[in-house]
Amino acid sequence: MATRSSSTKKKKRPPPPSLRTLSKAEARKQPKPVAEKKVRTPAFLYVGSPEQEALLVEELGPSARAVGAGIVGAEVRRDPAFARQLLPAPRPISALTREALATALIALIDDAGVSPRAVHVFTPEMARQGSARKSAHPLAHDATALQEVLQLKVDGRREKGKLGPATPHLLQLLLLGPTEGLVSITDVTDGPFGKVTVGDALASWPVPFSGGRAVKETSRDAPSSAHRKLDEAMAWLGTKVTKHDVVLDLGAAPGGWTRVMRDAGARVIAVDRAALDSALAKDPLVTHLKNDALSIDMAAQGASIVLCDVIWTPDNAVVVAERVLKTTSVRAAVITLKLKDPIDWGTLQKAQHLVRDLPGNWTGRLKHLMANKLEVTLLLRRS
């Protein structure tokens, strides 16, 4: 049988490029593989207003980064003026359905060995358009529905004895999709300056308001929309205004804050060189003093509550706060610090130091409220 000569043998084909070893020159021309980025959840989440998100990042420092509208993550635990809520140790959670997500959250509660006294499900905040009320987030309905399902599960387990008596813990879920978000379970007795009474918004951190939103914005028959700031501030203070109060309203015109205090039954001394709303000007329990705000003697007026929303430098607002602390008749104060761009962080730090170094019978906080624009509110309360 004839044999095939070596010259007629079938030649081996070279391996395809995907299987053969590349030469050094070819390897240098190949695109480098892209490393998969691992997104790490920050140690703390801070919730504020979308409009002031950049200021919150700046206030928190180098470790801070924006993770959503008005949501900033950081590796440090602080009480920044531009944040209204804190989520310690947040972790991602998701499910296919709302019911499944609620069940997963219950499992987290069981794993933590706590029985939270409150559960909050909330969305990021919408940016304000002009002076109108803030719009509802597209996920607002999902958040409300999930809150109801989760609360029913918690209550049901308590009734059946599967969950013990309420412990001083708060479960928070920041909803980022219909069935996904970031969850945090924390001890609410840990305040920014030590242990606190559960439910005291002025001292707690996290605060007892869902998403840091103390009130639902409403319309009021008032001369201006400024009443929203005071409605919110009084909720943070937890101070009940009565007919026995004498309120000193510095920078009162046209009378938005005076209206709020009169609706609560207090007598008001309105200080402003400008005119008050005509209805307030005729009110026998409103005294209008056309004086400079810094010239008023708080003690001589017998003020029990001091309000200040004057358009002036933040330094003057701090001076008013220092006078409040020296006036024995005053039991609460709401003072706005009007800011300009770029922010004078030195003055804000001065106000923060004043809050941290308050006399033992005073509690205070410096916060950018939901109704604030480029300003922060100094809240002071005597116990």
Image (cartoon, helix red, strand yellow):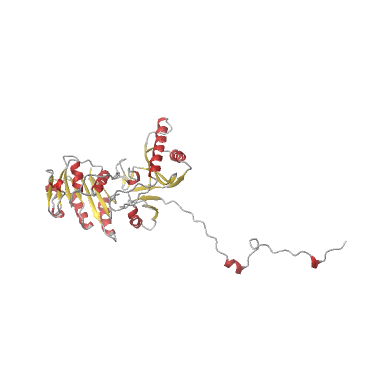
**Residue 96, position in %: x, y?**
48, 42
Q: Quadrant of residue 59?
A: bottom left
Q: How many marks do you count on the picture?
A: 0
Between 190 and 339, the one lying in front of the other is 339
- For the residue pair 7 and 239, the one nearer the viewer reads as 7
Q: Position of residue 320 (x, y in %)?
A: 19, 53
Q: Is residue 205 visible?
A: no
- Quadrant of the drawing holding the C terminus: top left
Q: Is residue 29 left or right of residue 238?
A: right
Q: Nearer the viewer, residue 155 or 318?
A: 155
Residue at the spot 80% in from the left edge and 68% down from the top edge: 7
In the image, residue 143 above or below residue 160:
below
Q: Position of residue 141 (x, y in %)?
A: 38, 42
Instruction: Answer with left or right where residue 5 lies relative to residue 367.
Output: right
For this orientation, the residue located farthest to the right is 1
* Left or right of 42, for residue 343: left
Q: Residue 265 lies in what quarter of the image?
A: top left
Q: Is residue 381 visible?
A: yes
In the rendered view of the protein, which quadrant contains the N terminus? Answer: bottom right
53 to the left or right of 224: right
Tell which of 278 and 86 is nearer to you: 278
Q: Residue furthest top?
A: 160
Instruction: Name the spot of residue 271 as percent of width and height, x first.
Output: 15, 51
189 in relation to 313, above or below: above
